[in-house]
Every structure is written in structure tokens, then in C-alpha cells.
Image (cartoon, grey):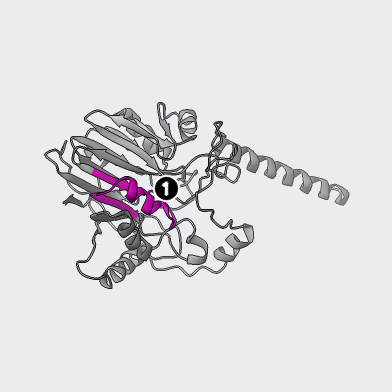
Amino acid sequence: MPKARIPLVLAGLSAAAGAVFVGVGCALSAPRFHGPKSDHFDGKRFRSAEPRPEHDTGALLRWLTHRDRGPWSHWVDAPPGPRPPERVAGGALRVTFVNHSTVLVQMDGVNILTDPVWSERVSPFSSVGPRRHRPPGLRFEDLPPLDAVLVSHNHYDHMDVDTLRRLEAAHSAPVFVGLGNAAFLERARVPGAHDLDWWQSARLPGGVTITAVPARHFSSRSPFDGDRTLWCGFVVEGPSGAYYFAGDTGWGAHFEEIGRRFPGLRLAMLPIGAYRPRWFMAPVHIDPDAAVRAQAALGASTALAIHWGTFAQADDGEREPVEELRAALAVQPEPKPRFLVLENGESAEVR
């Protein structure tokens, strides 16, 4: 090849690679939400009630080039837990920790599953991205009949499209999401999802109400769709009380506001992992100490630790969130907060 043509060939290859990158990114991206402006939607993008610092590419590179990773097991070969009961009634509240942020909650004869992930990786690609370090704590086939699925936001470790397709085929349970996510799921062949804005509610049979509540986080499926769809937590109310599922969130005044609007929460499911380094993660992920403070702000009788021990996503080690949580609880005055730590597949009856 003549030397004069080499720069042209390289430029062509670079342009082709750029086109592929943009094409893949657009295919992965969530569609833009179209709706009225609000205090957390400017007509184009959503935002948290308390603004978070925007980390630029330089901050990301600083973290990635100065990692201080805690230890993780290569694989924990834990057997799945027992099959849960088909229904729970009589005022009981039963939780089964499946993995990460996936929890089966049973109360008032209604079965609800949060942020379900049964896939091997939480990534847009099957061969790269965070891979699980232990199997799901419950076999997919052992799930009881589901009445609803809650998906807090569109990150891959919370909105796992392959699992949602399996659930649609097996259970046809309604999926509740933040604004704008139903359109993405429809395109991804998960039909019939229901968008909810913060403080908006939907009713299920049996006198159970699901309310989307604020969180301090963000959304994206690709580099091109940041904050196009809404992130949220959920409060579920029934005849036997109410419980809260946080999804992912940084610290904020929303904890106290949720506790004020829903007094007497029986259970708060709070994330404790993916919190290091704090300078980078604090705006969007609480740490174990903040989870203890969040339980108090919410006024929740019991808390359950979620978002730890399955996928290595930040610098904290596999058991580090649990160790830090126990240290934070140890310095609390008596009576100590009731904060449950369940291994994958373990269940507990919440008082």
C-alpha cells in the first residue's frame, strides 16, 4: 500500500469504529421520555431533588486508575434456598434474599419481586461486564406465583431484560417502573410495564398499593441516554402494614420524607454495597453507616441489607459491606436497630 494512502485508511477505520460505537450505543439507549415538566424533570432529563455532583470523564479515569479493591471470592458455590410458600397471610411479612437487590417479599397473600436478576452478568454483553460471584439464592423455577415486579431504575444490575422476559413468560405479573422505562421495556419485548412518577400509586388486588418514591441516583443504559428515564424506590402498603424498597440511592432528605408520609414502616430494604471510594460513590450510593441512619430516618422497625456480595462493582470487598454494617450497628445505643443480613436464599419472618 502506498504510504500516502495509509492516513486515509486509518481515518476510514477510525470513522468506521466510531460509527459502530455510536450505533451500538443508540441501540442500547433508552428512548427519550416525553411528558410535562416538573421539579425533577426539565422536559429532557430527570434529576434528583438534591443535585448530585457530576463526575466528568477525568474523575472516572482517576478512579479507574487508582483502584483500591477489596477481596472477592472467585466463586461461592452456595446451594439455593428452599422453595418459599405459595402465599403468606395472617399479618405475616416474609422476605427471601435472592441476590444483590433481588428480594421476594410476601405479605397479605401478595408476592412481589424486586429488581430481579438471574443472569450470569449484569451487562449489555454476554461475555464482558460484572459477573456474579455466587448463584442466585433461589431457583427461578421455585418462585411462587408473582403479583407484581418492581424495577427501581434501568441500570443493568437492576433492570435485567433477560430475566424480565423469563418472568413475563412464566408469571405475566405487572412490572412497575419509573417514568419512561415502560417504553424501553416494550421495545425490549417486555410488554405491559407501568410507569410511575414519584409519589404516584397503583393498586393491586387484595387492598395492596404500590407507590413510587424519590431516590438520589441516576439512569443510563449507554453513554448517550443519561437521566432520560426516572429512578425511584417503592413503598408497598397492605392491610398488614407497609414496607420500603430503596433500589439504589445516595443520602438525602427523601428518607425522612418517606418516613413522614408512610409512618410505621415494618421493613426497609436498604443498599449497603458499591460504596467505595466515597469521593466518587457517595452522591449515588449510601454506605453501611448511612444505611443505619436511613433506617432511623425512615422510622422502619426492621431493615434488610441488599446490594452486596454478588457483583463486584466498586472497590469494597465481598464481605466488607457486612463488616462495616455490623461495626456501625455496634456503636448504636440500646436497643440496637433490627437490621437483618441474609445470605443468598435465606428467608426471615419480619415482626
Q: Residue at the right extreme?
A: 4
- The residue that appears at 37% across and 38% down in the rendered structure is 163
Where's residue 139, x and y in %?
25, 43
Give the labeled residue for mark 1.
157
Q: Specify start and end residues of the magenta stretch as a single range.
A: 242-270
Q: Is residue 33 left or right of residue 77?
A: right
Q: What residue type is labelled 1?
A: Asp
Where's residue 147, x and y in %?
27, 32
Q: Is residue 180 magenta?
A: no
Q: Is residue 247 magenta?
A: yes
Q: Say which element carries label 1.
A: loop
Image quadrant in which you'd find residue 228: top right
Q: Is 347 located above or below residue 333 in the figure?
A: above
- The residue that appears at 47% across and 35% down in the rendered structure is 181
Q: Is residue 254 left or right of residue 51?
A: left
Q: Residue at the bottom extreme?
A: 331
